[in-house]
Each structure stands twice: as C-alpha cells, then as structure tokens.
Image: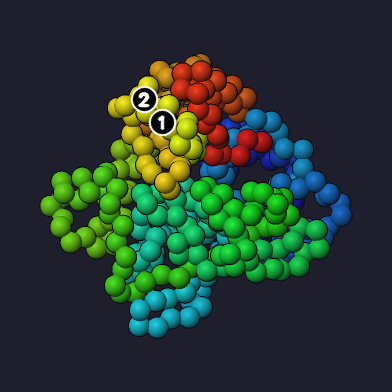
Amino acid sequence: MLIETNKSLKNLNSFGIDCKAKHYVSISSVSELKEILANKEYPNRFILGGGSNMLLTQDIDALVIHLNLKGTTVISEDEDTIQLEAMAGENWHEFVTSCIDKGYGGLENLSLIPGNVGTAPIQNIGAYGVELKDSFVRCTAVSIEDQLELSFSKAECNFGYRNSIFKNEAKGKYIITSVVFNLTKQNHAYKTSYGAIQQELSEKNIENPSIKDISEAVISIRQSKLPDPKKLGNSGSFFKNPVVNNEVFNKFRIQNPEAPFYEVSPTEFKIPAGWLIEQAGFKGKQFGEAGVHKNQALVLVNYGNATGSEIWELALLIQKKVKEKFGIYIEPEVNVI
C-alpha cells in the first residue's frame, strides 16, 4: 500500500472541491483495509467511497482511506431469483446496468444514481418509487475499532427514508465492504407509477416495458434534470424531500393548494423540496461560483472554483428562506465535512 501525503481530492469528489488529504491510501482488498485500520500510526481516518454524497468544506486532517474494493459474485440462484454480492467499490450505475444486461430486475428505477455500492445502504438510496432496501438482503462491514467482520441483515440496518443504522447509532463505527441483493430473473415487479416514467414510456410508445426500457426512461429523465458531475460539479439532490405531519401539511395545503405532494401514510406527507426551493426563488440563480441548477432546484452546483464553504453558505440561505416562506425545514441529504 502506498500512503501519499498532501493529496488533492479535487478529482475524488463529485462537487470538484479542491481540498487536500493530509494522508491518503487506496484500498483494493478487505485484508488491506484491516491492515490499515490496525495501523496505530494513523489514528484519525476518513473513509472515502465514490465521493458523490459529500461536500468538503475544509482539508482533511486525517488518513483518507479510499475504498476501491471491486468484484461481483453469485451467492445463490434459482429459476426466478438470483442473489448477487457486489463489493463496496463498484460504481453503482455500472453495477445496475450490468444487472439489467443480464436480465436481473429490481434495480432499474435506481439507474444513474451517483456513487458506489458501499455507500448505497448508508442513506438507503431511492428514486421513482423504489428504494435500495426493496432488494437488499444483507451487507458485510468491518469494525473500525477491532477490524472484525460483521453481517447486517435488512432488519438490523433499520432502513428509513434516506436513512439507516449507519447514519445513526452505527455512524463512524463500520466500513461496508460488500452488499448482497436479491434480484428477479423473471416475473419482474415493474414500478412505473411515477408520472415522469409513464410520460417517458408513452412518448416512446412503449406499453409493455422491459426492465431495460424502464432503466432507459429513468436515465433520460435524470439526464434532462441533473447535470453530469464531470462537466458541472454537484452531488445530485442536495436536500431531502421533507416529510411532514397532518397539522403542518393541512396548513401548507391551505396556503399552497397548487403544490405537489405524496402521501407517505395517513398521517405523513412528502413535499418535493425542489418545488419549495423553486418557489423560494432560487432555481437557476448563481451566487459567485456556486449556484442552483437551472433544470432542478434540488441540485446545488459548482460553476468552477467554488469552495465547499461557499456552497454550504448557499445551502444555509436556501434553508432559511424556505423556512421563512413555508414554515418547513429542509434537511441536507449530503454529508457536510
């Protein structure tokens, strides 16, 4: 293992923020991971995956451990289903498309989500009516403290909306090294009820879509709304869609009868954060080198040389104005470092 010093992380985070790591090492096996964790010379560590769900606001005064664990393995299969184990360093979208190319269903609605497989369970990624937990079986993780390997079942992960045990009581204690998924080989459960997918399929005159059709529809929708991080720095959706109770929702609806919403339960309602941000006047606005994307108000962008602090200041301003206008707090989806 080569440990580098004063390593620029500009090309290792999707915002393209030019922060530096005091020390940096790339890990390509679980044994290397255990070895570096056991090394007492570097007591402060920072785990880096795909770099897509974070905003760096400062240099990292620690050893940055970059997970490059690769590979996919068939755990079991029968006529109808297959269980696949994917290593944490696999690119999420490439893993999804490889499954679709083999005819495995269940992940097609999660196409083109940035990041790696290992970080997907942490926030229970989701899109267009599907969440990671729907196909999740278990994940393997290494304890940072004693380097023991543990397995977490779906129940043990305590998945919620963009949430899991790894964002709460287990935060900072484990490093996910692989994830097992249960996917369908036939009789796929198609999820096309979201209006955007229905519209995309209708425009292509597709009445009986395949999993590949759905994936391509999702990719087309996402590309029309979300900028490519390689061309314009961003981390996808910066804020979570707020889920509010009946009292807050009823007051909001009286004041904003035209607002879109989704019923989560009889007592909870999800309001699109992008709509709130757009109505607060931020869509397409630029503040120095930081800004809000012109096609999707949920996406904050780096127009060139913005610092993480400048983007975070913009995020705080958006939070404040949305709260003032609607009485609703929108919470960041990205990790602010």
Query: Which residue, given by chain and number where applicable, does mark 1 sit on?
Result: 250
Residue found 30% across the figure and 27% down from its top = 258
Name the kind of residue labelled 2 in the image. Answer: Ile
Secondary structure beneath dot 1 equals helix
Residue 325: x, y in percent?
46, 18
Q: How many marks?
A: 2
Residue found 29% across the figure and 72% down from its top = 187
Nearest the eye: 190 or 37: 190
| Residue furthest to the left | 205
Image position of 308 with respect to 333: above or below: above
Residue 156: x, y in percent?
62, 63
Horizontal placement of 270 versus 36: left or right? left
Mark 1 crowdedness (10 Å alpha carbons): few <14, some 14-19, many ≥20:
some
Name the kind of residue labelled 1 in the image. Answer: Asn
- The reply to whether the C-beta atoms of the residues labelled 1 and 2 are less than 8 Å apart is yes
Query: Which residue, given by chain and number where applicable, does mark 2 sit on?
Result: 254
Q: Residue 194: in sight, yes or no? A: yes
Secondary structure beneath dot 2 equals helix
Disc 1 to disc 2, how far (Cα)? Answer: 6 Å
Residue found 51% across the figure and 74% down from its top = 73
Horizontal placement of 52 versus 6: left or right? left
Q: Quadrant of the C terminus?
A: top right
